[in-house]
Image (cartoon, rainbow, N blue to C red):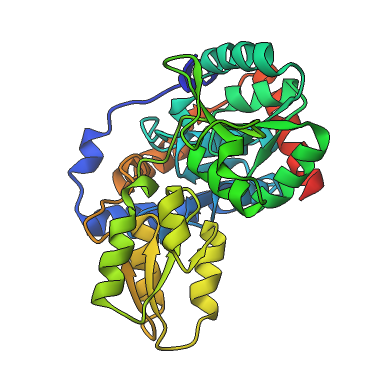
């Protein structure tokens, strides 16, 4: 089942907005924000393009923004400048009276889309037949509401890149094995931090419906879903060697969604929030090669001119789906609200939202 089957979708063409000048877009967005006042909050993910995030009332990672929205009880409209799973999570955590809007329904996440609930059900049959009831499912918050629901129903919980080790500790006290969805690299890198040998981590291939042992066979404690982030896998070990050859005193800082070999070569790795704080707290003159989304790396370089900051892979493009949220779509969303016809409302079905929230709440109680 695709994520769109669980949502009310109202995407409409916005060709007239694409013809506006930059100045017209900025003026009309600002005017709409002012007219809507306290009824509106715009959330901007860290990976969002600069000309959009400048209009956000709050910026952060996906779960952080969803939790902020949940605390804004008096705000009627929440426009999420991010991707669909982020807006889903916001709808799950906010009240029924609040309306969550995604400016462009085509702003998806390839990683989240690499696991659908039917494939996960098939996986569960395969691995429980082999390993019995020894498995607890854990899903990255970068997953669809349907996957969060599956996890919630099977006594599992969600995880973020910030609290991954803490959640691994909880999960492995509850059960002998973890099924980790949907990003194999975050799961593998967290498992290594937790002290789990590579040969005790296997990979489930949903296309072949079988378990693979890329690191040698052992008694698996972590079963990794064969998914990945299309942006972070573009940072390869060769890029680490190349940047160090070019800048011998540079520090390499990467996100744990990068492949294991890249993370092992880096000086530091951590969540988006970790990366931002590492740069913010570094002394002037520090040199960084950062392996994460291009918009954020560029923004950090602009905000910290006292440091030298480059992308670990300077040929990489920004996240294409995140960048679907542009000013024409944002303005179109705001002016539809003003007209009393809000579009692209994200409304997760109650039976999906209920169990997805269970999975999220379990994580929040531990974190």
Residue at point 41%, 41% (across, down):
229
Q: Is residue 194 visible in the rendered structure shown here?
A: yes
Q: Is residue 149 above or below residue 276?
A: above
Q: Name the residue furthest front.
A: 217
Residue at point 69%, 16% (across, down):
351
x, y percentage for residue 362? 78, 37
Image quadrant in which you'd find residue 307: bottom left
Residue at point 57%, 16% (across, down):
123
Image quadrant in which you'd find residue 248: bottom left
Q: How many marks?
A: 0
x, y percentage for residue 360? 71, 37
72 vs 292, nearest the viewer:
292
Image quadrant in which you'd find residue 361: top right
Residue 245 as seen in the image, left or right of residue 41: left
Q: Is residue 94 visible in the rendered structure shown here?
A: no
83 vs 29, nearest the viewer:
83
x, y percentage for residue 31? 40, 55
Q: Name the residue furthest bottom.
A: 284
213 vs 303, nearest the viewer:
213
x, y percentage for residue 92? 66, 32
Q: Is residue 24 above or below residue 7?
A: below
Residue 349 as seen in the image, left or right of residue 252: right
49 vs 305, nearest the viewer:
305
């Amino acid at each position: 089942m695709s994520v769109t089957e669980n949502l009310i979708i109202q995407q409409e063409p916005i060709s007239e907005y694409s013809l506006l000048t930059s100045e017209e877009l900025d003026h009309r967005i600002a005017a709409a924000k002012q007219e809507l006042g306290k009824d509106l909050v715009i959330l901007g993910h860290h990976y969002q393009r600069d000309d959009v995030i400048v209009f956000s009332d709050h910026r952060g990672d996906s779960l952080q923004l969803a939790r902020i929205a949940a605390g804004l009880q008096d705000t009627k409209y929440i426009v999420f400048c991010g991707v669909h799973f982020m807006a889903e999570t916001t709808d799950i955590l906010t009240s029924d009276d609040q309306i969550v809007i995604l400016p462009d329904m085509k702003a998806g996440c390839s990683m989240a889309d690499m696991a659908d609930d039917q494939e996960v059900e098939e996986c569960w049959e395969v691995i429980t037949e082999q390993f019995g009831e020894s498995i607890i499912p854990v899903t990255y918050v970068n997953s669809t509401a349907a996957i969060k629901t599956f996890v919630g129903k099977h006594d599992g919980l969600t995880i973020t890149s910030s609290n991954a080790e803490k959640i691994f500790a909880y999960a492995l006290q509850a059960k002998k094995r973890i099924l980790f969805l949907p990003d194999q690299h975050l799961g593998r890198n967290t498992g290594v931090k937790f002290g789990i040998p590579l040969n005790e981590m296997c990979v489930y291939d949903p296309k072949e419906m079988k378990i693979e042992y890329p690191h040698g066979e052992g008694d698996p404690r972590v079963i990794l879903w064969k998914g990945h982030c299309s942006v972070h896998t573009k940072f390869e070990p060769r890029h680490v060697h190349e940047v160090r050859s070019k800048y011998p005193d540079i520090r390499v800082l990467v996100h744990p969604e990068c492949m294991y070999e890249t993370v092992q070569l880096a000086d530091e790795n951590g969540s988006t929030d970790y990366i931002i704080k590492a740069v913010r707290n570094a002394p002037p003159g520090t040199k960084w090669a950062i392996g994460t989304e291009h918009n954020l790396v560029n923004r950090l370089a602009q905000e910290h001119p006292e440091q030298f900051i480059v992308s670990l892979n300077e040929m990489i493009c920004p996240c294409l789906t995140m960048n679907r949220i542009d000013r024409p779509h944002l303005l179109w969303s705001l002016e539809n609200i003003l007209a009393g016809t809000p579009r692209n409302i994200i409304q997760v079905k109650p039976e999906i939202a209920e169990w997805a929230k269970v999975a999220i709440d379990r994580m929040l109680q531990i974190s």
